[in-house]
Amino acid sequence: MAVALARVVSPMEISSNFCSLETIREGGRFVCTRYDDGRIRKKKLRWGLPTLYANSKLASVGLEAEYMRNLPVSSSFVANSAGEVVIPSEQRVYDVVLKQAALVNELRSNRAAAALEERADVVLPGALSLLNEAYDRCGEVCAEYAKTFYLGTLLMTPERRRAIWAIYVWCRRTDELVDGPNASHITPSALDRWEARLEDVFGGRPYDMLDAALSDTVGKFPVDIQPFKDMIEGMRMDLKKSRYKNFDELYLYCYYVAGTVGLMSVPVMGIAPDSQATTESVYNAALALGIANQLTNILRDVGEDARRGRVYLPQDELAQAGLSDEDIFAGKVTDKWRNFMRNQIKRARLFFDQAESGVTQLSEASRWPVWASLLLYRKILDEIEANDYNNFTKRAYVSKAKKLLALPVAYGRSLIRPSRTPPPTSTKPSG
């Protein structure tokens, strides 16, 4: 048994465009005790007054699909020009899925469930009001920046709702590091410090109030640190990479910045008790939704990204369509561009289709916000088509009226019980 004593210090000053409390004053302490079975108990010794700086923005939640023959993704190991074995992106992501699924399967055993219940009773017994304040602040941020999703979370159990808010806020803060008002000042070393801070959060050593909410969350649910680290890796990629030579590279980027959110969230949302699906297949579906949402973001923002010198489209597929970066920078809608976009939209929809198979497998109280996200994001693809594929100067968006119409549909689908036929357990493309 190991015991670690951590002192809560003033947080790193990460600029924020969505919240500004004071920083947690020096003096707050936790005793974190890790037992041989892996359980962690936290006991508060003394907290100072709460304050903080935060940072924000978020992609969405994600997986893979049945690919068209003209949009292949190799699923076998290959060797590069130096003779080194290269692991395809989908295999690298699949390994993370398997690890997370194993954690959840352990939790679903009676022994692990009992351990979780015991752990929930002892976390921060002397700091409940401060912890509640931290979670409330996370909820306020979610309500401000993801109104539809926030509405759906209100149907969840209080514990799950608060945990999802804490994860959402961490993702916003992470994304804002490279896509916020101070992004030009962010360096790789700053992301290294953010990752070290993440490890402290998972170790029960939060820097600020929002970190404390996430630290409490990962102590209660079987959330693995790897998807969080992978999201930071996606931020590193944005600092150094503005082109993707093929879909395998783009797929890995989409996993880093969006698919990871699904892997973070499923342990909190939970799987329906009567689901016949394997844990792995549910994670694959969550991953699919993230990939679909991020591909939709990319297709919607082609013009905006081009003005920043970025092209988040597979270079080899552009060339096959008779297009180049220069055509994108010129911003002209041609027949070649329309044909190219039709194929890209088709791929994104395949990911959405695969995501559907897993949403129904989630616990009933968690389905509505996920269905709402899926239906609303998929409608953005419809709007791109309605704009005659002009995503250079027109931004596709879903009107408030269409959003309101989609909400009851999403709610209705959330009431559908899990199918007796389990969804596919693998995200590998066929052929």
Image (tube, rainbow, N blue to C red):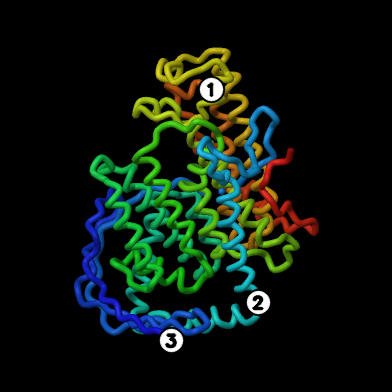
Q: Which mark is residue 318?
A: 1
Disc 3 marks which residue?
A: 1
The crowd level at tag 1 (other Cα within 10 Å; few <14, some 14-19, many 20+) is: many
Please provide percent x and percent y for residue 152: 54, 55
| Residue type, label 2 | Ser
The residues bearing labels 1 and 2 have C-alpha atoms spaced at a distance of: 49 Å
Which amino acid type corresponds to the residue marked 1 in the rendered image? Leu
Q: CA distance from mark 3 to mark 2?
A: 23 Å
Above or below residue 72? Residue 171 is below
Sort mark 3 into few (<14), some (14-19) or many (20+) by Cα contacts within 10 Å: few
Q: Which residue is mark 2?
A: 109
Q: Amino acid at mark 3?
A: Met
Quarter that holds the N terminus: bottom left
Residue, far left: 26
Q: On screen, 422 above or below 258?
A: below
Cα distance, mark 3 to mark 1?
Answer: 56 Å
